[in-house]
Image (cartoon, rainbow, N blue to C red):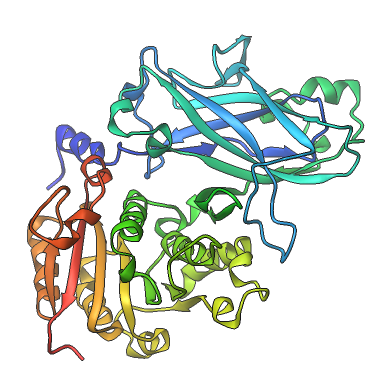
Amino acid sequence: MSLTDEEFRAKLEKHFSLYRINLRSPLVSPIAPDQWYRADLLLVNELGLFRRADIEPEGQVIVSCNLLTPNDSNDSITPLNAHDSDWELEIRPCPNFSEGRLSTEAMPVPGFVCSGKGSFEYRVRSKHNSKQPQKKFLCIGATELVNFQKKTMASTVEDLILPLVVGPIEIIPDLRLTSQESADTHLPLELWDFAKIKDMVYDSYRMFSTLSEPPVNVAIHEMWDTGIPGKIWDSALVMLDVIKNMIKLHPDYIGGKHIIDLSAGTGLLGFYLASLMASPESTIQQGRITITELDEAVELINKNIMANKFLLSKEKTQKQASLLQTKSLLWGNTQDAESCGKAEMIIASDVLYEAQFFEDLVKTFVDLSTHQTRIYIGYKRRGFDEAEERRFWSLCGEHFDVKLLQYEGANDVDDDLVPKSTLNTGVQLYRLLPHSNLK
């Protein structure tokens, strides 16, 4: 039976809690100093959609843009450094471009005005007449919300709207532009002469920091066109908050443990844990992280390994160098599970999407667990009805004690792991503890 319009709208409502800034058009590279360039953006939820009611009729999302310098060793992008001694970046509002027409006046602010389509212009300027070409990344984030309906849902703007990191963009100090090229750089990309564009930058990342000084962070590359595994879903962001709470309240769950990020998608949770353990200021004992996915989805995780190659640096001890690994894991495949090894903790985000795989998933939980393993699952209802959900948790209950943890609950020691973000996103946090007879 098909959904009514009202039921369909109610279903979509559950996904309009967190937004992301995405590129609407690629950026050009290389760029010349003191020259204005345009960035066109989209504001979307986890499904790539925007709800106009959140910003109409007079709403604004004001953005800022900062330069980030990539790591200059080990071919790693990260850690990205926000301190730049050579260059500074300015931004300004720009004219709206819609349906092939460019407005004659600039928007009142850089960012989004009454629309999920936004833009700004930026330029880089040398601080001391730098002559060397340099590669940089742009970090674009929301800094202020005006008449934005979701404003009260999060404690900070960044908790509500995920920033975007784009690059690399090469700055060439002696880049010569013709008068026509100089006049065109601030135009939307659609109005450029494509024959004159040397390169376009499509690659976008999300940056997550575990230490500000010295900077320790990971950059997670997304590939939205690859489907489910190619982006960071709301459940993964909630599970990231769970991990942060775990670090503060129950560091013994993590320190020195083998942790498996199951069917990890982009690998965000595993990479974050690895960067935490790699931080020079971390008090968390070194452990081992295994990130798993299907063969066809491992490509993106491997790209993220290359982006965060500092985590595998041979300058660390051998124990640190073997901290992070990826494994292909087909649910239900005993040999794949044996290759991963038993885990003290398993984290799983958005792994429930096909009822036909329930038995295989539970078997994988069993194969990866000992009698001391803790399993945490971030679950957001998408396509299942209550009967299907009950069947899955019942299957889990044959081998594990299943507990739905509660925000500000007082009945379980792990209730304090549940972040406030579960209330806004509809994500639930389940914990599985093995029965005593599990080997």
Image x and y of residue 394, in percent = 8, 71
Report whether residue 352 is seen. Answer: no
On screen, residue 90 versus residue 54, left or right, reads: right
On screen, residue 332 versus residue 222, left or right, reads: left
On screen, residue 68 above or below 5 = below
Residue for point 62% across, 55% down: 79
Question: Which of the 4 quarters of the picture holds residue 93?
Answer: top right
Q: Nearer the viewer, residue 53 or 92?
A: 92
Q: Nearer the viewer, residue 232 or 309?
A: 309
Residue for point 25% across, 66% down: 376
Image quadrant for the C terminus? bottom left
On screen, residue 378 above or below 368 = above
Image x and y of residue 284, in percent = 43, 67
On screen, residue 358 above or below 56 = below
Image x and y of residue 270, in percent = 44, 66
Image x and y of residue 100, in percent = 60, 21
Question: Which of the 4 quarters of the picture holds residue 115?
Answer: top left
Report whether residue 249 is seen. Answer: yes
Q: For the view shown, which residue lies furthest in the top direction?
A: 105
Q: Nearer the viewer, residue 330 or 375?
A: 375
On screen, residue 16 versus residue 7, left or right, reads: right
